[in-house]
Amino acid sequence: MSNPTAAISSEPESSSSDSFMVLWSITAPQKTFLADRLSDYKAALGKKSLPEFWDTLFEDWFKRWPSKDDGRALVEEQLKSWMVTNNRWHITTKQHKFLTDRIPDYKSAQAKKKLIDFWPFLYMHWFDRWPATEVAPQGLVEKKLKAWYNNNARVTASTRQVLNLNKPAKRTRRPAAAQTFCKVYWSKPLPNGTVLRNTITAEWVAAWQKSKKFDPQIDVPRVAINFINKVTHCIFLKQLPPIHEEIEQHPDQLKHDNSEGSPDPGDEAEDDEVKRALEYQA
């Protein structure tokens, strides 16, 4: 029997939501089991009845693949993450190129506040190539196209501000302890068995579903960096002393020791982050 608590990727790959794709090794029967229930998951999203869906999913899963009591919480988080990351809009290579080629037009229209003119033009050319179907009606596809540009039309290197080489170099700042904690425990189980990566994903999805912009027909947006920071701070602050001592002795903390000289101007901003994290936790 395969181990349902199989390994997750050991390093955070990037800051984008793609880094939240849980690299969870599951067997073909387990993958089929989950894929067969994606339609039920989507229906539960639309009806806002996810608690009932999760209860049924977990019950059916553990009947087939039992797990020790101390490992159930981790498996449940992985199951939730699998459903979230696989409930996405799949496009072909040609469709991806079509959308990517029009990112400059999207950015230009966005800068001029003329997106209302961009969308009809995009829809006309899209549906001319890929007509709407019963499975993918026009209204649904239009929402997903908008979500795609919102998630993918980011600032590129060519549009960033040019580096001022005459500006005095800023002293390297010691990273916040919570940042080092995130790096160390991104995919490494904490003493309570949870994984930071999965917890953040689950909380982001929950926050999205409670937001005013929530639409069950739209893919979950990319995880915001400030959200990652807030949740990481909250979890770090609740850890027992051994974890805090481990992080303080981590090479990333020691090599950026700021104990000498004047306080780093970034420390005040870091304190503000901690305050916001405590407010989030409350």
Image: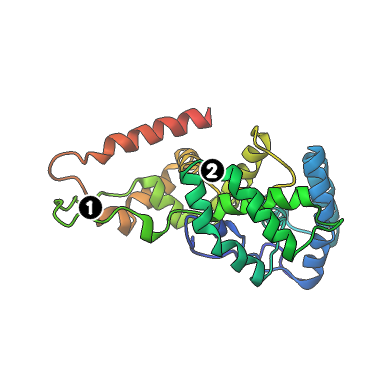
Q: Quadrant of the N terminus?
A: bottom right
Question: Looking at numbered disc 1 in the image, what kind of residue is underneath it?
Answer: Thr
- Residue highlighted by disc 1: 172
Q: Position of residue 67 (x, y in %)?
A: 75, 58
Is residue 211 shown left or right of residue 260? right
Q: Position of residue 177 (x, y in %)?
A: 36, 46
Is residue 67 shown left or right of residue 227? right
Residue under the image location 84 percent in, 51 percent down: 40
Element under label 1? loop
Element under label 2? loop
Question: Looking at numbered disc 2 in the image, what kind of residue is underneath it?
Answer: Lys
Query: Quick check: can you spot residue 114?
Result: yes
Q: First in sequence: mark 1 or mark 2?
A: 2
- Between 82 and 128, the residue placed more toward the observer is 128
- Residue highlighted by disc 2: 114
Q: Position of residue 204 (x, y in %)?
A: 60, 43
